[in-house]
Image (cartoon, rainbow, N blue to C red):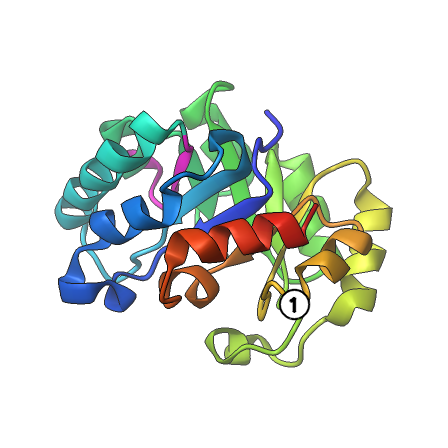
Amino acid sequence: MNPPFRLYVITDRRLAPDGDLPALVGRALQGIPADSVGVQLREKDLGADALLSLARDVLAVTRPAGVPLLINDRVDVALAAGADGVHLAGHSLPAAEARDLLGSDRYLAASTHDLAQARAAVSGGCDFVTFGPVFHTPSKASMGSSLGLGGLREACAALAPFPLVALGGVTPDNAAECHAAGAAGVSVIRAVLSAPDPAAACRALIVADE
């Protein structure tokens, strides 16, 4: 399954007014073409029960909009919630084992930070990967220096036509550069969830990446 979206929105419920993440996701998706956006539920501090409950609440927003919801790391939660897939982190199950559990009708993605990790994700059966940080961003400071557009371009060329989604410091001002470097799409957190108008931010990122 190739990703049907150009924009991959990663959640952080701390950015949601009054902690209402489903409502924030709903505002972000308002009027957005269903085939343009995917959402990753990335709330790493939640236990299984709380994450499952939140996943079901977010699915109640994404499913009617026709937008895929992937769960970060937790294959068990994704299956229990009936989510559309899983996004693997560095400490997650190996991709091949996650794929065996998920089957072929759900998305499998992974976070990658260099070409070797991206190659491993491809061989493990992932449908796409996030790749970065492309630009500097405080949320990815622990990953060291940014890879830059050159690093993104090299990885996209090496793995073509496998889809890489650019991550890290992406904004409407540089999303087109990511696409020009070969990225299949862009991934953001604050650029959408912290925007005064999340839906307008989504539209701007989709247009910039076309």
Q: Secondary structure at mark 1?
A: loop
The C terminus - image quarter: top right
Residue 116, can we see it?
yes
- Give x and y (percent) for residue 117: 66, 54
Quadrant for residue 14, please give it. Answer: bottom left
Quadrant for residue 85, please give it. Answer: top left
Residue annotated with mark 1: 173
Q: Amino acid at mark 1?
A: Asp
- The residue that appears at 18% across and 39% down in the rendered structure is 57
Closer-to-camera residue (135/32): 32
Q: Which residue range is magenta in the image?
A: 67-76
Closer-to-camera residue (7/132): 7
- Give x and y (percent) for residue 181: 81, 56
Asked if residue 127 is among those painted magenta in the image, a careful observer would answer no
- The residue that appears at 62% across and 29% down in the rendered structure is 2
- Give x and y (percent) for residue 140: 52, 74
Closer-to-camera residue (27/112): 27
- The residue that appears at 27% across and 53% down in the rendered structure is 24
Quadrant for residue 193, please give it. Answer: bottom left
Asked if residue 73 is among those painted magenta in the image, a careful observer would answer yes
Q: Is residue 188 left or right of residue 133?
A: left
Q: Is residue 7 above or below residue 63?
A: below
- The residue that appears at 38% across and 43% down in the rendered structure is 29
Q: Is residue 43 left or right of residue 199?
A: left
